């Protein structure tokens, strides 16, 4: 298997795992505080292998998430394309930060490009979330980022992806 | 080090339009798709295809719950099975007795209607579907079912349970479908008070145990405890199925409308089995305009 194929398989596997975590039923109290697994996976690969996924791939992943969650088709696709673009552009800056500051940077990306954009789109289609707990996904993602980063880095090194 | 970075970044800038241009195209495409999706069911085939791709994941996530149910079935004691069995036997007997009376009433009703020369009501057909336990958007009241277009599920099809109206199908793919519950804030359902035939519209409130009836006049004859049934005026839901019980009526003379809220009859977040409803051919209300979700 060439390096490129190996990259594709590992990246696809990580996205499938993220999608499973997104669909996994949680108790009602925790459901709103579910970290943005797909967005975080996307950010990781954009930082670690910049340019490998690209805006098109990110867009397709977002479209799958839209279908899986029953959201408006294009909502997550749009925010994922924007996230991939920003993360790829900023990867040199974000990558060298200490883990905790990196988590804060990731949280900013998720807050503005995933949550706020999503809130805006939902509001325009008369489906605005009715509770402030909608915003819990950002702190939850921030807290889980270090563990996620270390896990994915371990996976990347194990399969020797440059 | 620098060489490695450059090596990685190459594909970004080498081929095709620049990344910024691609981003702009994708933004326009997303906006166009969201508009088309919001303004009607034009993207349903695309969604059905994507959902088909994902449905293995839905079943995979559901697997532990299925296995849990199976295990608890295997390890149920004989005593509890016997107890259940005798309880169900009694229930069955009681229901059968009620059924006999009901059948006689239905025949009588039909005869009277014929005498009055009004249209004859005919029942529909139902089939059991199971809820797949996956979490969708927590701010939408939606469920995923293990039946799809292959089993005859159609968009807008009503969903019932043993106690009342549950919701309607909003997306259907080959093997799975998803339904919007009547408690979703974007759902509206025409209802009727059983006691006096007063008509109203029940909107979802977002919370799982409340429906709102915002457009009832302050002097409308509605009381706490009134049973609301579906009126069938939407042409989508079968008439006369229980929807909810009025739990509060607040009258404020300074407001044009009364504040009425009801508790849904159906076990919205309790049961795993639901009933899909098909109108028998020839009955009123196939495909006519309906309250859109």
Image (cartoon, coloured by chain):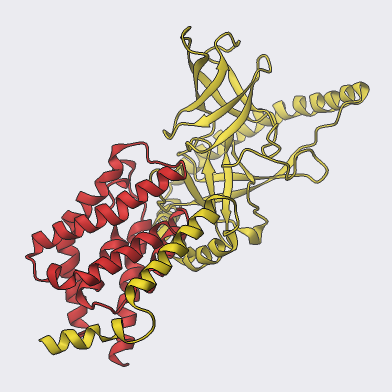
Chain colours: A red, B yellow
Q: Where is residue B115 in the image (x, y as percent from the top left)?
A: 93, 22
Residue A143: percent from the left, percent from the top?
A: 16, 54
Foreground pick, A87 / B237: A87
Residue A114, given in percent of the width and then of the height, sits at 31, 55
Residue at x-position 54% and y-position 10% = B218
Number of callouts in the render? 0
Instruction: Look at the image and tell me whether residue B26 can be seen.
Output: yes
Residue A141 relative to residue B126: left or right: left
At a point 6% along the width and 65% down the height, the residue shown is A98
Q: Which residue in the rendered view is the most extreme toward the bottom?
A: A2
Tell me: residue A68, above or below residue B9: above
Quadrant of the snapshot with the N terminus of chain B: bottom left
Q: Which residue is drawn at 29% across and 38% down?
A: A132
Pinpoint residue B187: horizontal percent, then vertical percent: 54, 37
Q: Can residue B60 be seen by looking at this rendering?
A: no
Task: From the viewer's side, name the closer residue of A54 and B251.
Answer: A54
Residue depicted at x 59% and y 43%: B168
* Left or right relative to B256: residue A49: left
Task: Locate the C terminus of chain B and report the quarter of the image it occupies.
Answer: top right
Is residue B288 depicted above or below A161 in this figure?
A: above
Look at the picture and state if B178 lies above or below B167: below
């Amino acid at each position: 298997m060439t390096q490129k194929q190996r990259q594709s398989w590992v990246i696809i596997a990580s996205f499938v795992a993220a999608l499973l975590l997104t669909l996994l039923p949680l108790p009602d109290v925790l459901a709103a505080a579910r970290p943005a697994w797909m967005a975080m996976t996307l950010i990781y690969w954009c930082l670690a292998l910049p340019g490998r996924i690209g805006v098109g791939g990110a867009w397709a992943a977002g479209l799958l998430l839209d279908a899986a969650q029953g959201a408006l088709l294009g909502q997550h696709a749009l925010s994922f394309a924007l996230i991939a673009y920003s993360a790829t552009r900023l990867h040199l800056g974000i990558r060298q930060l200490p883990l905790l500051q990196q988590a804060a940077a990731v949280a900013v990306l998720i807050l503005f490009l995933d949550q706020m954009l999503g809130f805006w789109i939902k509001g325009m289609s008369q489906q605005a979330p009715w509770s402030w707990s909608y915003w819990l996904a950002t702190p939850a993602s921030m807290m889980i980022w270090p563990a996620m980063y270390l896990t994915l880095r371990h996976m990347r090194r194990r399969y020797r992806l440059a | 080090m620098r060489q490695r970075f450059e090596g990685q970044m190459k594909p970004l800038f080498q081929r095709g339009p620049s990344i910024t241009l691609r981003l702009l195209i994708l933004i326009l495409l997303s906006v166009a798709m969201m508009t088309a999706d919001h303004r009607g069911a034009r993207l349903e085939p695309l969604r059905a295809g994507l959902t088909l791709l994902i449905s293995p994941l839905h079943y995979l996530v559901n697997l532990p719950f299925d296995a849990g149910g199976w295990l608890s079935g295997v390890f149920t004691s004989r005593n509890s099975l016997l107890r259940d069995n005798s309880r169900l036997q009694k229930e069955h007997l009681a229901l059968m007795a009620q059924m006999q009376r009901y059948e006689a009433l239905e025949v009588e009703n039909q005869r009277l209607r014929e005498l009055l020369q009004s249209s004859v009501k005919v029942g529909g057909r139902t089939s059991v579907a199971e809820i797949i336990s996956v979490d969708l958007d927590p701010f939408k009241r939606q469920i995923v079912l293990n039946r799809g277009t292959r089993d005859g599920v159609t968009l807008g099809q009503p969903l019932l349970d043993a106690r009342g109206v549950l919701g309607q199908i909003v997306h259907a793919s080959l093997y799975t479908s998803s339904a919007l519950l009547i408690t979703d804030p974007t759902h509206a359902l025409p209802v009727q008070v059983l006691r006096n035939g007063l008509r109203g519209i029940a909107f979802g409130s977002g919370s799982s145990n409340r429906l709102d009836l915002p457009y009832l006049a302050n002097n409308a004859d509605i009381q706490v405890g009134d049973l609301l049934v579906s009126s069938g005026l939407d042409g989508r839901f079968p008439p006369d199925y229980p929807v909810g019980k009025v739990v509060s009526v607040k009258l404020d003379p300074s407001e044009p409308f009364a504040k009425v809220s009801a508790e849904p009859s159906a076990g919205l977040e309790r049961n795993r089995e639901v009933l899909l409803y098909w109108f028998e051919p020839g009955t009123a209300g196939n495909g006519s305009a309906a309250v859109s979700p």
